[in-house]
Amino acid sequence: MPTTEACNDDDGLWQAGWYRFAKALRSPNFGPRPEGAQTDLVVLHSISLPPGEYGGDAVQRLFTNQLDWDAHPYFQSIRGLEVSSHFYVRRNGELWQFVSCDDRAWHAGVSSWRGRDNCNDDSIGIELEGLEGQPFDEPQYETLASLCAAVAQHYAIAYIAGHEHIAPGRKQDPGNGFDWRLLREQLGWDPQMFPAQIAQR
Ligand SMILES: [Zn+2]
């Protein structure tokens, strides 16, 4: 491999915001980050479609606008929804990526954190296959921890929070079943990077 191709955007793990160890499936649901945006926040979510059913491909279909809205009664409630996340971690730890981390994915909606609104502008969204209030599986924590570490190597991450923290009252994911203390231990990050109520756990 010619070393002249190396640049600061390609450190072996990342290429133009795409993570080497994720299965890439491009979503059309994204846009540029605002000029000057400093991507310093990781937002954790949970999702499953239909809720509580794992192992299918409905989430990938949703994030690529390929979901058959008539395939399940629940899908009627989200018909026409155009969303995405940067990453999706399946129950077995399998990792997918839909949007370059250099771009703005559509996962947070109306939100505010560390004194800044519109968290989509300057955050990286990670969806965990699951259901809010339910526990997550061990392989998911392993993938999540290594992903967060890789993200923090490439972006100046200073904060990590759940959707429930950045959109309180409107969102409840990933919920009480998510083990923040385990993730904190796995990452070894400063407790001040986490929501205060989690740093104290
Ligand atoms: Zn969410």
Image (tube, rainbow, N blue to C red):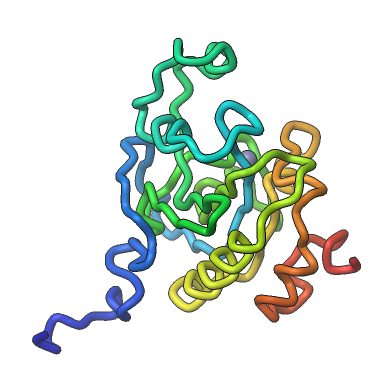
**Residue 126 location (% of width, % of height):** 54, 52
Which residue is rendered at x = 54% and y = 75% of the image? Answer: 149
**Residue 129 location (% of width, % of height):** 58, 45
In the rendered structure, the answer to whether residue 118 lies left or right of residue 57 reads: right
**Residue 5 location (% of width, % of height):** 14, 81
Which residue is rendered at x = 70% and y = 51% of the image? Answer: 162
**Residue 188 location (% of width, % of height):** 70, 81
In the rendered structure, the answer to whether residue 95 lies left or right of residue 170 reads: left
Picture layout, residue 80 above or below residue 126? above
Name the image quarter holding the N terminus: bottom left
Picture layout, residue 56 above or below residue 134? above
Q: Residue furthest right?
A: 200
In the rendered structure, the answer to whether residue 15 lies left or right of residue 39 reads: left
Q: Residue furthest bottom?
A: 3
Q: Which residue is at the front of the view, 37 or 147?
A: 147
Q: Number of callouts in the render?
A: 0
Which residue is rendered at x = 87% and y = 59% of the image? Answer: 197
